[in-house]
């Protein structure tokens, strides 16, 4: 995926289709109240915020050695949670830090939908 090497670089329609498919699958499983999707989405929401905060500090304090070490923390979070959703950035054209924050809102919505679906399921039964 292009976002692994150059997160602000070219994204084509294939990346967008894969991202939309991933989003639809998350929404389907969230609608069922899956606990695994809930946990995954909580980590996704937190990772988006972590990536955003670290990139904000990274751009503000470029060249700081300690910050460079801390910045390496964001890469696993970015690869696991933001890269699968990066194809939608073809519509927005945001920097990867701001897009990660935007995707944390999507993951938060998935958590909310999972909790709401589980609550409705418990009331019906």
Image: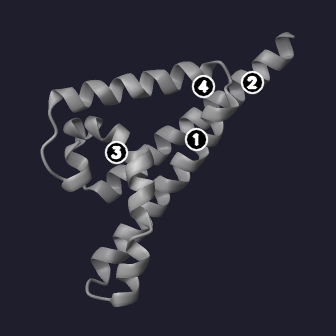
Q: Could you tell me how many numbered marks the image carries?
A: 4
Instruction: Tell which circle, 2 or 1, labels the residue nearer the N-terminal end.
Output: 1
Q: Which residue is mark 4?
A: 30
In what quadrant of the picture does the N terminus appear? top left
Tell me whether circle 2 and circle 3 mark residues in contact (CB < 8 Å).
Answer: no
Q: CA distance from mark 3 to mark 1?
A: 14 Å
Q: Which residue is mark 3?
A: 83
Q: Which residue is mark 2?
A: 118
Snapshot quadrant of residue 12: top left
Instruction: Indicate the secondary structure of the residue bearing disc 4.
Output: helix
Instruction: Tell which circle, 1 or 4, labels the residue nearer the N-terminal end.
Output: 4
Q: Which residue is mark 1?
A: 40
Mark 1 closeness class: few <14, some 14–19, many ≥20 residues within 10 Å: some
- The reply to whether residue 102 is visible in this rendering is no
Tell me whether circle 2 and circle 4 mark residues in contact (CB < 8 Å).
Answer: no
Instruction: Tell which circle, 3 or 1, labels the residue nearer the N-terminal end.
Output: 1
């Amino acid at each position: 995926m292009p976002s692994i090497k150059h997160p602000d670089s070219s994204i084509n329609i294939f990346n967008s289709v894969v991202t939309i498919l991933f989003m639809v699958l998350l929404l389907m499983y969230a609608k069922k109240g899956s606990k695994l999707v809930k946990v995954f989405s909580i980590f996704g929401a937190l990772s988006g915020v972590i990536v955003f905060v670290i990139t904000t500090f990274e751009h503000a304090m470029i060249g700081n050695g300690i910050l460079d070490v801390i910045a390496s923390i964001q890469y696993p979070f970015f690869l696991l949670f933001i890269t699968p959703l990066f194809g939608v950035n073809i519509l927005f054209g945001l920097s990867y830090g701001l897009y990660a924050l935007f995707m944390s809102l999507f993951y938060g919505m998935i958590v909310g939908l999972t909790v709401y679906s589980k609550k409705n399921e418990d009331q019906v039964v």
